[in-house]
Image (spheres, grey):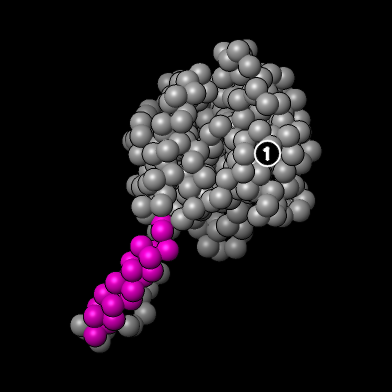
Amino acid sequence: MAVPALDKRQARKALDLPEKASVVLWLGRLSVYTKLDPWPTYAILERVAQRLNNPLVLLECGPDDKPSQEQALLSLRKCCPHVHFKRMGGDEPVSEESKRQALSAADLALSLVDNTQETFGLSVAEAMAAGLPVVASNWNGYRDLVRHGLDGFLVPSRWASTAPLVSARLGWQQFSGIESFPVVAGALAQLVQLDADAAEKALVSLLASPLLLQRMGRSASARANELFAEHVVMDQYEALFAELELRRLAAPAEAGSGRAMPASLDPVQAFQAYPSHPSQPSAGKEPASELLDRLPKSLCEARAPLWRLLNESVPAGLKGDLHSDLLKKHPVLP
């Protein structure tokens, strides 16, 4: 797997990016419901930008969710005055040539996903193949791609303390058709916490050291080619097909019969292996007014439907724990 690179200087000129800036790439859809909540990424980069000696650009390359979240995203970006945002895509898909320019212009890729819908991480593999070190969530298949400290850094993740308490109810609401899959997935993602301090340290370490960027970029490229070269992937598929054929032949007759629905639908239990770390007890109870006071108004307004669903699903005596968990999810800027 190889992504032909353009000259970085030419790519930045074509995209109207400062030649001396630190350019961080997000590659993929922007979807609060089925990809990631962008606010933690924005807030972490705002903190990083204040520690660097040169401008910091977040290059967002990919289509928006439907219906578009563009206005909500614009409001959040205004809360991060030290970060320069460059949007590629939005309402329209991004062409392969534009994606190639973005990969060539960037110093590193950042993918702080928080959603159970995210499994493999194709955009991470593409960034690695282009020779970019990656800072990514330590999450499901992402940890199988990025080797921490070699190809980039993995950011610890965990379910919030209240996630198991709302999980079964949300699962049944989706199964019964009361709520859609994107809404339930987005609500559960609000209870996935990433280590913002670890992400900040990883980004500063890379962006402050051209030698580390270069070394990890070479390592990432080599790993992508080792894992995803055409002949490697084809050999693995052929071996898998042969194994499945043997399993079918050896399977008992009852293996093909249908099974009853489980008595419980519990997404957090089903996806308990996705985060890298176990849940931690809530540190304290935060009243809703405190939550609204600490976070940007535009964020609270945009997440209100998801937070309302969670608030309705958590036991009455633990609503303060839910508010505390949401504050852990969303970094607070000074």
Q: Is residue 251 magenta?
A: no
Name the residue located 37 percent from the left edge and 54 percent from the top edge. 227
Q: Is residue 262 something one can see in this rendering?
A: no
The number of numbered badges drawn on the structure is 1
Residue drawn at point x = 74 percent, y = 39 percent: 14
Q: Nearer the viewer, residue 118 or 167?
A: 118
Q: Position of residue 272 (x, y in %)?
A: 36, 47
Name the residue nearer the viewer: 145 or 259.
145
- Relative vertical location of residue 245 with respect to residue 201 in this rendering, above or below: below
Measuring 32% from the left and 83% from the top, which residue is drawn there?
A: 256
Disc 1 secondary structure class: helix
Q: Identify the main secondary structure in magenta.
A: helix
Q: Quadrant of residue 282?
A: top left
Quarter of the image for residue 75 reads top right
Query: Is 122 drawn above or below residue 230 in the view shown?
Result: above
| Percent coordinates x, y for residue 166 in the rendering | 48, 44
The image quadrant of residue 236 is: bottom left
Q: Is residue 42 left or right of residue 213?
A: right
Left/right placement of residue 296 relative to residue 228 reads right
Q: Which of 222/269 is in front?
A: 222
From the top left corner, tell me how far across and down residue 303 is, in percent. Answer: 66, 37
Report the span colored magenta. Answer: 228-249
Q: Type of residue at label 1?
A: Ala
Residue in view at x 24 percent, y 78 percent? 247
Above or below 292: residue 157: below
Q: Label 1 belongs to which residue?
A: 11
Question: Is residue 290 depicted above or below 67 in this figure?
Answer: above
Q: Is residue 225 visible?
A: yes
How packed mark 1 is, by other alpha carbons closer than 10 Å (few <14, some 14-19, many 20 or more), is: many
Q: Quadrant of the C terminus?
A: top right
Task: Give x and y (percent) for residue 53.
Answer: 60, 13
**Residue situated in front as seen by the camera: 189 or 290:** 189
